[in-house]
Amino acid sequence: MIIKFTKNVKDTQIKHIESILKKQNFTTTYINGDVYKLLVVIGDTTQLETKRLNVYDFVEDVINIQKPYKESSVKDKRKIKVGNVTFNDDNIVLIAGPCSIEDEKSMDLLVPKLINHHTHIIRGGAFKPRTSPYSFQGIGKIGLEILNKISKKYKTPVISEITDVRDIDIFIKNVDIIQVGARNMQNYVLLEELGKTDKPILLKRGFMNTIEELLLSAEYILANGNKNVILCERGIRTFENQTRSTLDISAVPVLKKLTDLPIIVDPSHAAGHWEYVESLSLAAIAAGADGLMIEVHENPEFALSDGQQSLKPNNYFSLVDKIKLIAKAIGKKL
């Protein structure tokens, strides 16, 4: 960190700042330059409340060189294994299934078809946080138990979204990946508790949040000991209303530069309309995403939630064939 002083700063004021920092076990080096007077602070400044230094009228600027998300920014080519599925730079992982689990029969009808078309992980919502309290809210714990049966029957990992910190135990028991949705991205109590587990966590970016805020949310999980975090870009809110959200494709290469955590894309929630899902999916893979999460339903017109953005199986299978071509072109495995 570098503290830049105003031109009229006094030596006693600089020494005052130095003494405060030394009491916090930081090493400082003073530079009396021709243009600026600077204080270089050496140490882990992630826990230092740098904004407090701007309270002093003789401090012109504070430049924090160290990223505030130190765990997320570690570059170690992370590989996250979920059963026989690996999230890394070499693979494209496909997660697919209905927005909401409606019953066991419909899951048994759909899941074998998905698995036979390169789907690695099955998704399904048991608890559904909705904008309106009158909308279908999911079938709850029964849905998780259905997912558990599906996982064992078809020997495939499953994922579902958690909405309440009190449900952590039943999620650990029934699913292979716990999803934190956009609305809970900054539910720090939930993130901290998930960080105390060893269950892989898929963290979705909030639709009003920056990339840095996403990484800081991931930091809550990582800093509490759970290193198995997968990031998900699902679109952000803009002034455009032709789609549900605006998919931030640029977030993929930016996150690839900032972190080694796997990054997947959810084109279904970004688009809000099934006819745009294919184009967004292909763009995401070409941009370097490590996987996709896509909603698929046998009869979207009768779906209890988000049918308008769900692909019918045949459309999904056609998309998978195109993903294969892009994967081959960029040197990845599907």
Image: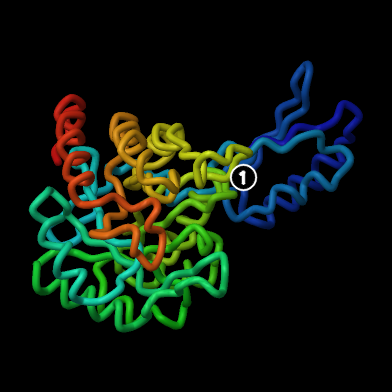
Going by the numbered disc 1, the residue's amino acid type is: Thr
Q: Residue 135 or 96: which is nearer the viewer?
A: 135
- The image quadrant of residue 201 is bottom left
In the orientation shown, which residue stands out farthest toward the front? 301
Question: Left or right of 224: which side holds 21?
Answer: right
Question: How far across and how far down the image is residue 242, in percent?
Answer: 53, 39
Give the residue pinned by disc 1.
27
Q: Residue 185 or 257: which is nearer the viewer?
A: 185
Residue, x 16% and y 29% (percent of image)?
Answer: 325
Residue, x 22% and y 49% (percent of image)?
Answer: 94
Question: Left or right of 285: which side holds 332?
Answer: left
Q: Is residue 308 visible?
A: yes
Secondary structure beneath label 1? strand
In the orientation shown, which residue stands out farthest toward the top? 34
Q: Is residue 44 visible?
A: no
Question: How far across and how far down the image is residue 45, in percent?
Answer: 59, 48
- The image quadrant of residue 77 is top left
Within 10 Å of disc 1 (Cα), the crowding (few <14, some 14-19, many 20+) is: few
In this rendering, the answer to whether 128 lies above or below 325 is below
Position of the N terminus, as image quadrant, is top right
Question: Left or right of 168: which side holds 29?
Answer: right
Question: How far across and how far down the image is residue 125, in percent?
Answer: 35, 68
Residue, x 40% and y 75% (percent of image)?
Answer: 138
Question: How far across and how far down the image is residue 275, in percent?
Answer: 35, 40
In this rendering, the answer to whether 302 lies above or below 2 is below
Colour style of the rendered protein structure: rainbow
